[in-house]
Image (tube, helix red, strand yellow):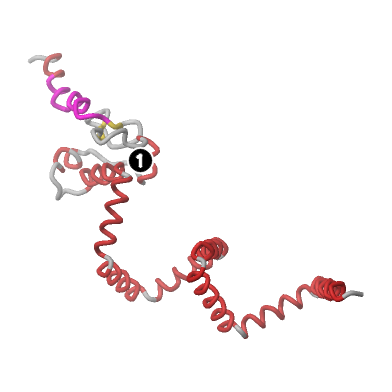
Amino acid sequence: MTKEEKRLDRAARRRAARLANHEEVLEKERKYREANREAFRTRIREFMRKARATNPEKYRELQRRSEERNREKMLARRREWYAKNREEALERARRYREANHEQLREKNRRWRDAHPEYGSFEAARARCTNPKINGWENYGGRGIKFLFVSHEQFLAEVGRKPSPEHTLDRIDVNGNYEPKNVRWATRSEQGKNKRRNFEDLNAGLNPE
């Protein structure tokens, strides 16, 4: 028997032993991992550090696969930590925002430039829910409601903004911001769809 054949034979015997004593082998492995947890973590951190330094693409791929494989565990551990350390978490977030203020502002600006629909979504919601803003009396102050529960629902209803000249418009000017009653319209289209126009029309149809 050659050296390679002996190696393959040993590997086959090990696999057979593992299959025959599956539960026992798993228990041994679990105990070994628990006894050497820190050593394993140190080796993994060192491996990831080298991968990040020598092969960034491989590092990102390993990180992505690890996050996918352990997503639920990571989220559960994060939620548990935040629940126990709420004040520390808030302080960390505050320090991070202060240290990265300009970068965060620029990132937010780029995102809003790429998603102009979100600005229209936020502005319409504020007009209906915030009494302190200008124009409240024409929207929330006269009973107009904002009934979209999320930006995703809003975007699915109206779609992407056709051009910078388009703004959000209610088809029925006395109706709510809700599905089937919103659209993108140009300034001239919105000018024809004002309350004043309908009031003048009603006055003409029903003279005193």
Amino acid type, callout 1: Phe
Tag 1 secondary structure: helix
| Quadrant into which the C terminus falls | top left
Q: Say which residue appears at 19% left-offset and 39% top-offset.
A: 139
Q: Say which residue appears at 48% left-offset and 71% top-offset.
A: 53
Q: Say which residue appears at 30% left-offset and 45% top-offset.
A: 118
Residue 27, compared with residue 128, is above or below; it is below
Q: Position of residue 121 (x, y in %)?
A: 29, 43
Examine the structure image and report whether residue 6 is included in the region drawn in magenta: no
Q: Range of the magenta residues?
A: 185-200
Which residue is most to the left?
Answer: 208
Q: Position of residue 136 (x, y in %)?
A: 16, 43
Which residue is most to the bottom?
Answer: 35
SS assignment for the magenta stretch, majority: helix
Residue 200, compared with residue 114, is above or below; it is above
Along the line of sight, the residue nearer the viewer: 96 or 170: 96
Along the line of sight, the residue nearer the viewer: 132 or 1: 1
Is residue 72 visible in the rendered image? The answer is no
Residue 194, compared with residue 152, is above or below; it is above
Q: Quadrant of residue 157?
A: top left
Residue labelled with disc 1: 154
Q: Position of residue 205 (x, y in %)?
A: 15, 14
**Looking at the image, how many numbered discs can be counted on the residues?**
1
Is residue 128 visible in the rendered image? The answer is yes
Q: Quadrant of residue 192?
A: top left
Q: Position of residue 77 (x, y in %)?
A: 48, 71
